[in-house]
Image (cartoon, rainbow, N blue to C red):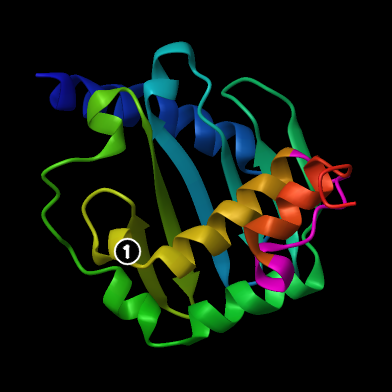
Amino acid sequence: MGIISGAFLYVSVFAPAYESDIEGSESIDSEAVVISGSMYGGCMEMDMCASFKLIDDRSYSYLEYAGGEVEKGKIPAELSDSLFEYIDSNALFNDSKMATSDSCDSFVDGIDYRYEVANDDEEYTLDTCGTVFVSNRAAQNLLLEVWAFMENPTTTYPTFIEEGISGVIKDLIPNVHE
C-alpha cells in the first residue's frame, strides 16, 4: 500500500510541481544532452525532494524543494567531462534496463534517485530502484557528486574523481591530516 501511495504522490504532486518550477522560459537546443534528476521517497511527505536539470554546456537549474527558489549555475568542467563521458558510453544503455528490486531505500522512508537522460533523439531512465543502474556504484557516485555540488556550489571540496572520499574528509576536517 505504501508503494502505491508513494507512486501516486509522486505522479500527482511532485512531478507536476517539479516540471512547473524547474522549467524555465529559456529554450533548450534539441540536440543538447539534458539530464533531469529527482529524489523521491521519504522526502516527499514534506515536499523536500530536490531536483535538477543539467544541460551539456554545464549549466543547471536546481530546485532544493517543491515551491523553493530555482538556483542556476554551472558545474565544474572536470565533473561535467566525467559525467558526459559516462553518458556517451554504452553503460548508459545497459544501466537503463529494468531490474527487479526487492529492497529500495524509498520503501522505508529513504531516498532513491531517478534520472532522465535525453541524448539526441534517445531517452534513458536511470533509477536507483528498478533499473540496472542500481549496481553501477561509479555512475551513482558521479551523480551524487553533481547533487553535492548543486546543494553547495561555493564549496571547494575536491571531487571524488580527483581525490576520492578521503579528500572530501580532509577538507571537511582540516586538522585531522596535519
Q: Where in the figure is residue 68, as x and y percent of width and height?
A: 68, 22
Provide the secondary structure element on which disc 1 rests: helix
Q: Is residue 26 visible?
A: no
Name the residue located 38 percent from the left edge and 87 percent from the top edge: 90
Residue 96 sits in quarter? bottom left
Residue 158 sits in quarter? bottom right
Q: Magenta stretch containing residue 151, yes or no?
A: no
Q: Which residue is mark 1?
A: 133
**Relative horizontal placement of residue 103, taking residue 35 as reference (left or right):** left
Name the residue located 43 percent from the left edge and 58 percent from the top edge: 116
**Relative horizontal placement of residue 52, taking residue 111 as reference (left or right):** right
Instruction: Name the kind of residue labelled 1 in the image.
Output: Phe
In the rendered image, the vertical position of residue 88 relative to residue 95, given as above or below = below
Q: In the depicted view, which residue is nearer to us: 93 or 107?
A: 107
**Relative horizontal placement of residue 173, taking residue 91 as reference (left or right):** right
Q: Where in the figure is residue 133, as x and y percent of width and height?
A: 32, 64
Q: Where in the figure is residue 20, as x and y percent of width and height?
A: 56, 33
Main SS category, magenta section: loop
Region rendered in magenta: 152-163
